[in-house]
Amino acid sequence: MIDALLDGIALAPRVRDAAVRAAPWLERRDPRAVAVRARVLRAFLDEGIAESDLAGTTGYGYDDAARERYESLLARCFRAERVLARLSIVSGTHAIVAGLDALVAPGATLLAANGAPYDTLRHAIATAPYSLVSRGVRYAEVARTGAGETDLDALRDAVRAQRPAVVFVQRSRGYAVRRSLTIDAIAATIDVVRGAHREAVVFVDNCYGELVEEREPLEAGADLIAGSLIKNIGGGLAPTGGYLAGRADLIERIAARVFAPGIGAGLGPTLGFGRALVQGLFYAPLVVAETLRGLDFAAALFAELGCAVDPIPGDLRTDIVQAIRLGDRERLIAFARGLQRAMPVNARFAPEPGPVPGYVDPVIMSSGSFVSGATIDLSCDAPLRPPFEVYLQGGITAEHAVLGAVFAAQAVYEAGGFSSPMKP
């Protein structure tokens, strides 16, 4: 596979070295992936979907069988009492803010357990016009340790002192120098919260982490999770949407806020997209496993070229994001432009950094997915700020992620980012 991608690539010797280095874990059979596939297959068998369930509705969406079946499938996969998954919830951020808005009353406290959330969410919570803070919600953060981990002792003290209504946990790294959380780390965080204030709702941002590990955060004791339908669980087919899953009473409160009290989750058409949602979930375990393999190669390649990478090659992954530290602005821009040349859509365009709503710094993005913003497809994002890390995401097939990594590395080399195409 590698040799077929290397015609005209000056970095070919380094790419081959990275392929040799990555081979042991790229070729192994990941037992986690097998367990995840079995979970999703079991959900489909237990649900017993019929062809007639997939047609969906228009208008108000009363009695939409596709919606009801899809939400029931997600509940089985996530081990949730109830799920709210709707096309009208257009992103993970939308789902999270809707949940927080429903669960944290004015005067109550929202506590972020592992540092500041990702930029757009923190903006929506604390600094944007009409933010949660602007309507009277109290907001606080527990800073991460110097190693980027959750500070459990500081979290325990903060929960005891502030008695928050909701403790928010971000599973993925976002666009920050920090580690993504394992399910075991989430469980330890939840144990600390429960010991300090049993009534607090633990709300986990599950974006980028679905179907990566054998367990999901609800199985570790979380009360609520939220995410996007066009990331991991969309399988590359879901056209839009977001979800919340967890305790039935919390989902009912959120549905009343998203729609209307007294109506709640009783409406919401699938508009003929039920088939894509259900089929995407069926394919999702395979797509996620392919993504993880491709990102392992990207980590090996850029480590071979002297970059700091996280996770390191061969490490067990907890989400579909690979951080690569490039060190300066021009390398970030070159990386994004190189990656763009590997895209199935819009490959002829060159990304430019610019303002993005919710971000303080300019951001450069590379994307060419068939569904706009579907980061289960290969893409990258990079805020233009020190330490100048790029966040590589997705890849429906491992081969596509490998191609993108090679093109991105070649572009950085051509921009003067690596001193020599040969190993020193």
Image (cartoon, helix red, strand yellow):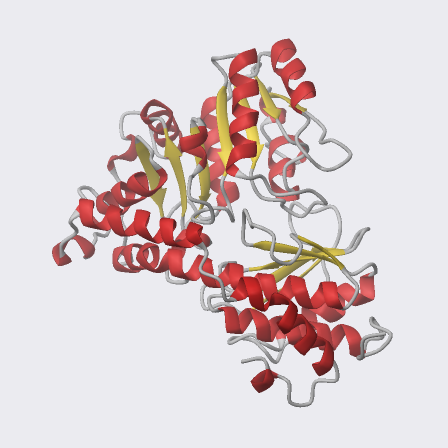
Residue at (46, 34) in percent of width and height: 98
Residue at 39% over, 61% down? 286
Residue 124 figure quarter: top right
On the question of residue 39 being in view, the answer is: yes
Q: Is residue 227 left or right of residue 419?
A: left
Is residue 67 found left or right of 382 in the rendered image?
A: left
For this rendering, which residue is in front, 362 or 13?
13
| Residue 350 in view of the camera | no
Identify the residue at image location x=27%, y=52%: 41
Residue at 59%, 32% (x, y): give it. Answer: 130
In the rendered image, residue 414, in percent from the top left (x then y), is placed at 79, 79
Q: Nearer the viewer, residue 108 or 144?
A: 144
Question: Where residue 221 sits: x, y (%)?
Answer: 44, 26
Residue 117 picture location, percent across and down: 63, 37
Q: Is 13 above or below relative to 354? A: below
User: Splitting the image into 4 quarters, where does residue 161 fall?
Assistant: top right
> Where on the picture, by quarter, is residue 147?
top right
Of residue 144 and residue 314, the one placed in the foreground of this image is 314
Q: Position of residue 56 (x, y in %)?
A: 21, 53
User: Relative to residue 237, is residue 376 drawn left or right?
Assistant: right
